[in-house]
Amino acid sequence: MPIIEVAGKSYETDEEGYLVNLNEWNEEVAGYLAQSENVVMTDQHWEVINFLREYYDEFQIAPAVRVLTKAIGKKLGAEKGNSQYLYELFPYGPAKQACKIGGLPKPTGCI
Amino acid sequence: MAAASFETPAFREYPSVPALKPDAMAHLQPYVANEKIQEALGLPGKLVDDWHDVAIARMGDLLGKYRGLRVFMDSCVHCGACTDKCHYFIGSADPKNMPVARQELFRSVYRRYFTLPGKLFPKLVGARDLTKDVLDEWFSYFWQCSECRRCSVFCPYGIDTAEVTMAARAVLDTVGYGQKYSNEILGKVTKIGNNLGLPGPALLDTLEGLEEDVKADTGVDVKFPLDVKGAEILLVTPSADFFAEPHIESLIGYGKVFHAAGASWTLSSHASEAGNFGLFTGDYALMKKIATRIRDAALELGVKRIIVGECGHAWRVTYSFWNTLVGLGAGGTDPYAIEFQKQLDPRYPQPMHICEYTWDLIERGVLKFDKSLNDHRTITFHDSCNVARGSRMGDRAGGQFDIPRNIIKAVANNYVDMEAGTIREKTFCCGGGGGVLTDDLLELRVKGALPRMEALKQVADSRNVNFMATICAICKAQFTKVLPYYGFKMGVVGGVHQLVSTAIRLEGQE
């Protein structure tokens, strides 16, 4: 498995760059993973990442795209509660890219 | 995800056989499943030391068990009718993606070990030893097939090429050379109950959220019940319907249809997946295990009917294979099969496709629609391979083609078919089916989508088509990803029940 080095510490990732040990995640690692995805993190990005992690803590899975858009809409205003806004933040797809940066496992299946 | 370094194929002025580019796709392999993923399925964690002998033994086992496979090995005359019928060959121009050449990778090994001329004079009959290079080649090219069976439609001998792909993948799994994407999913569905790994509480939370959304949209209390004992209908649907866009729009559509019909229905957290990737990896035992979860849930909940949501290969597995998998309709003799058959209501087809269910209600005038609500759309229908070529629907031949189209025409005013050679039984695969819907095979997926994208482009340009409906979770996810590569918006794809959801008028709706 590939190893990434961030701020002098090493972390194991899978072939696709997802963190293997979810509890090793921290903001510096998130920054590194975002950079590898060509995503420049802003407060708006962090809102999404923080929500994903809270949801994951409760349910052991990333939220459905609809659950995520609704939550973001409530927090940041209805005009941002849609998947188009999320795709602007995470162009490769909010589910997969935001999970990666947030240190969560990759969602699998027919998605 | 690093930007993929490949070129999207250009639209061709006249669809024609591409000039060959030998080994154009030889570099492409999916990720190999790691030990944890493999062992969860009872498969060897990594390539076993005596892989050669194990592989040949497994081939022999499959050839003995599946008479069809042996016939397919022997009956090909290399006429070439299939060569240009494969979307991956058309999009990649790699000659090994010609269906006949892909099968030859397996057939040449078959000849060497299982036929007399191949044993005695291998060079004369094009027989090959199974070397590590050959095994690697299998892993590459048998994961560049979506088992869509379009080539089989054109084969004068009726060779089911997907069976060959399944056999090769089964051998690879047996020696510890599994594909990460499919085997990880198989691990989740057998442990948690769905391909996503969505646990019960998360499913419940998602469904409650949907009820709120539909209430806010329509003012009507449409329910999405979970684990309701004594419900009449069990709906099994791909777990992507709970999670992804545009899939969830169809789930909302099913809910509205059940509501309008006054049906008593439920979803199950134990069997929260209609899909069955055991079909893709050619693992009959796993297929059975996954199908049995649905039977278990049906017995536990006491339902009288089973309805399957918009999922292509799920419908093929339930419609075509449930007789031997769970003993439905074939006089299964184990006590659970007997109980299952007794419990299900014989007045209805079992299982039933959600499109059959909705179409029946439409024909009986139970559902009310305002078709003009779909007037912003000009719609075409993409036949999904496993529905089109692996099953039927309703009680008339061709029902699997006509029923979804009839529904669309009943809920919308503007419908246009794509070019005849690209639809119905000759439909082109979306490019993501059969276990290749993964980021590590994105190049294959984009290239394989070319023929479907060309047909869509033609009706988009000439007839203003702006919506392509389909009844498969894989097709929906695949097109959402690849449409932008061909200059379309990802929202061009959606479900048939998404269109139903738009137009249906519920009693008391605001």
Image: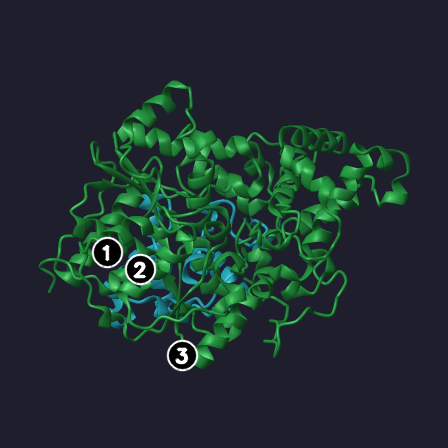
Chain colours: A cyan, B green
**Looking at the rendered structure, which numbered label has been put on residue B362?**
1
Q: Nearer the viewer, residue A106 or B254?
A: B254
The residue that appears at 26% across and 51% down in the rendered structure is B360
| Mark 1 → mark 3, Cα distance in angstroms | 27 Å
Q: Residue furthest front?
A: B396
Q: Quadrant of the C terminus of chain B?
A: bottom left
Residue type at numbered disc 2: Ile
Find disc 3 in the rendering and name its residue: B464
Do the residues under discs 1 and 3 have CB atoms within 8 angstroms? no
Percent position (x, y) of residue B247? 36, 57
Instruction: Give the side of residue B199 with respect to residue A24, left or right.
Output: left
Q: Could you tell me if residue B490 is visible in this image? A: yes
Q: Earlier in the sequence, mark 1 or mark 3?
A: 1
Q: Could you tell me if residue A69 is visible in this image? A: no
Residue type at numbered disc 1: Ile
Percent position (x, y) of residue B228? 21, 36
Q: Is residue A56 above or below residue B113?
A: below
| Mark 3 → mark 2, Cα distance in angstroms | 20 Å
Do the residues under discs 1 and 2 have CB atoms within 8 angstroms? yes
* Label 1: few (<14), some (14–19) or many (≥20) C-alpha neighbours in 10 Å: some
Could you say whether the residue bearing mark 3 is in a helix, strand or loop?
Answer: loop
